[in-house]
Image: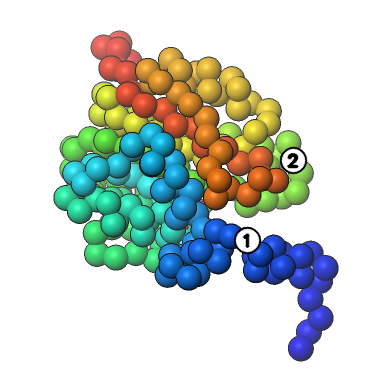
C-alpha cells in the first residue's frame, strides 16, 4: 500500500474523530455540511415547504438532501460544476454560477417566477495564497448577491458562506443596504479552525424604480 503523506494522514485522523462526520455517516447523510444548513435553518427559520430556492455550490449534495426533505411543495434549483447527489425534487444545473450559460438555464427553469431564498455554500479552489483565496471567496459572495438582484423577491432571504478576512466587513456593510436584517453565524458543524462563517440576510428590500 502506498505510504500516505503526513497531511493526508492528519486529514484522515481528523475525519475519523470529527463528531459531525461520524454523525453524517451514521445517519446516512451525504456530508457533514448537511448539519451546517440544519443549524442555520433552526436559528433563522429560512425554510418551509413551499419555498422556491436557488442553491449555489451544491456538490456533493449535503445541503441538497436537507433541502429536498423540507421543500415538499416548493422547488429547488441546484448549481455546481461537480456532480450533485440528489432526488427527484431538485433541478440540477452543471456549471459555474456567474457564467452566462448557467444564468440562462436558471432563467429558463424559473420561467419568470421569483425566488424566496438564495443559498450559497460555494468555495473557491484553494491556491494556498491567502490574499488570492480571499479575493476569490469574495467574488463568489458577489455572485450570490447578484443572484438576489436578478431573481429574489422583495422580502426574500439569502444565506451565504464567506471567509473572515479582507473585504468581508465592507461586503456586509453593502449587504445591509439591500436587506433589512443581516447576521453572521458560525454553525457548530463548521470546523472551529476554519475561517468560514455564514452571512444570513433577511427581507430583501424593494428594488428602487431607477435600478
Ligand atoms: C463546500 S462545497 C459545497 C458543499 C455542499 N453545500 C454540500 O452540502 O454537500 C463547495 C462547492 O462550491 C462549488 N463551486 C465553486 N465555485 C462555484 C461556482 N462559481 N458555481 C457553482 N459552484 C461552485 C465547488 O464545486 C464545490 O462543490
Residue toward you, 168 or 79: 168
Q: Residue at x 79, y 76 (%)?
A: 4
Q: Residue furthest bottom?
A: 1
Residue 146: x and y in percent read 41, 31
Q: Residue at x 41, y 48 (%)?
A: 38
Q: Residues within 10 Å of mark 1 (few under 14, many from 20)?
A: some
Quadrant for the N terminus in the image: bottom right
Numbered tag placed on residue 113 in the rendering = none
State whether residue 175 is above or below residue 139.
Answer: above
**114 horizontally vs 102: left or right:** left
Residue toward you, 49 or 19: 19
Residue toward you, 57 or 111: 57
Q: Is residue 83 visible?
A: no
Quadrant for the C terminus in the image: top left
Q: Secondary structure at mark 2?
A: helix
Question: What is the quadrant of residue 155 in the picture?
Answer: top left
Residue 154: x and y in percent read 26, 24
Between marks 2 and 1, how big is the CA–CA gap? 25 Å
Question: What is the quadrant of residue 157 in the picture?
Answer: top left
Numbered tag placed on residue 130 in the rendering = 2
Q: Secondary structure at mark 1?
A: loop
Residue toward you, 191 or 90: 191
Residue 92: x and y in percent read 33, 58
Q: Residue at x 29, y 65 (%)?
A: 87
Numbered tag placed on residue 18 in the rendering = 1
Question: Does label 2 or label 1 sit earlier along the sequence?
Answer: 1
> What colour scheme has been applied to the protein in the rendered image?
rainbow
Q: Residues within 10 Å of mark 2 (few under 14, many from 20)?
A: few
Q: Residue at x 53, y 17 (%)?
A: 173
Q: Is residue 153 visible?
A: yes
Amino acid at each position: 500500500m502506498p505510504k500516505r503523506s503526513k497531511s493526508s494522514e492528519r486529514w484522515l485522523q481528523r475525519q475519523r474523530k470529527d463528531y459531525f462526520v461520524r454523525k453524517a455517516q451514521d445517519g446516512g447523510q451525504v456530508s457533514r455540511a448537511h448539519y451546517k444548513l440544519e443549524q442555520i435553518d433552526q436559528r433563522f427559520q429560512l425554510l418551509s415547504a413551499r419555498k422556491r430556492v436557488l442553491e449555489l455550490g451544491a456538490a456533493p449534495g449535503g445541503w441538497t438532501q436537507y433541502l429536498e426533505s423540507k421543500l415538499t411543495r416548493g422547488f429547488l434549483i441546484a448549481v455546481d460544476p461537480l456532480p450533485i447527489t440528489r432526488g427527484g425534487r431538485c433541478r440540477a444545473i452543471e456549471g459555474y454560477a456567474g457564467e452566462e450559460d448557467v444564468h440562462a438555464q436558471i432563467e429558463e427553469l424559473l420561467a419568470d417566477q421569483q425566488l424566496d431564498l438564495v443559498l450559497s455554500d460555494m468555495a473557491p479552489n484553494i491556491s494556498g495564497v491567502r490574499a488570492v483565496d480571499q479575493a476569490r471567496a469574495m467574488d463568489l459572495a458577489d455572485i450570490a448577491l447578484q443572484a438576489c438582484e436578478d431573481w429574489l423577491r422583495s422580502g426574500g432571504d439569502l444565506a451565504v458562506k464567506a471567509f473572515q478576512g479582507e473585504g468581508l466587513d465592507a461586503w456586509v456593510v453593502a449587504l445591509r443596504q439591500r436587506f433589512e436584517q443581516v447576521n453572521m453565524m458560525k454553525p457548530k458543524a463548521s470546523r472551529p479552525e476554519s475561517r468560514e462563517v455564514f452571512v444570513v440576510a433577511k427581507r430583501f428590500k424593494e428594488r428602487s424604480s431607477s435600478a
